[in-house]
Amino acid sequence: MKMRTGFVSNSSSSSFVVAFPVGFVPAPESIKAYLFAHRSAIGVSYYDDTLSADEAARHIYAQMKGQRPNGLRAINAALRGWVPGQPKMESFKKAGSNETDWEAYDAAVEAFRKAYWIRQKPKLVGSGADLYVFSFGDENGTIGGLLEHGDIFRAVPHLVISQH
């Protein structure tokens, strides 16, 4: 019998919909000033490493530079993950069966996501903002994990959508 003795991970990823000021000019320096004005490094208690604010800003810029602000296709794709409070699959078991009514479940989840976005959008855009979408995951190693779990957008309006 073979046993695995190395590191085993249940990787995760998350999408983030983040509000930036209208007309924000993306560059590592401006991203650092906007997101990390009072923070020099990003750390997570279960990682032995940290990420400097400069390096985090460069990773954010790498994803931001190819985007158009308020891209509905990117926002809709981000919302395809798990959003807080969405219906649970277990609630859609067919009567007297262990089988799931997938059509009803998918319709309920889609309706919930639309309503969720309608409730959340005003909190993000307020009196005016440009929205950008980011995706980070610990399947990309420590840096991806720090960006995903390091609460890097805590200083600004944002949504987190789990893509587990």
Image: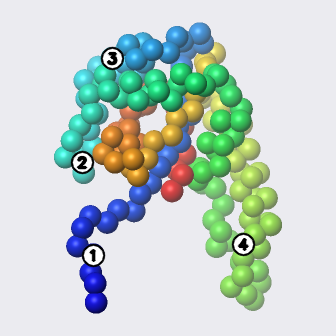
Residue drawn 25% across the image and 23% down it: 40
Q: Position of residue 98 (x, y in %)?
A: 68, 85
Q: Which amino acid, mark 3?
A: Ala
Of callouts 2 and 4, the N-terminal one: 2
Residue 157 appears left or right of 5: right
Whether residue 82 is visible = yes
Q: CA distance from mark 3 to mark 1?
A: 43 Å
Residue drawn 24% across the image and 51% down it: 46
* Residue identified by numbered label 3: 37
Of callouts 3 and 1, the N-terminal one: 1
Residue drawn 72% across the image and 82% down it: 99
In the image, which is nearer the foreground, mark 2 or mark 4? 2
Pointer 3: residues within 10 angstroms few (<14), some, or many (20+)?
Answer: few
Q: Is residue 21 above or below residue 84?
A: above
* Residue identified by numbered label 1: 4
Closest to the observer, 109 or 65: 65
Q: Is residue 28 above or below residue 74?
A: above
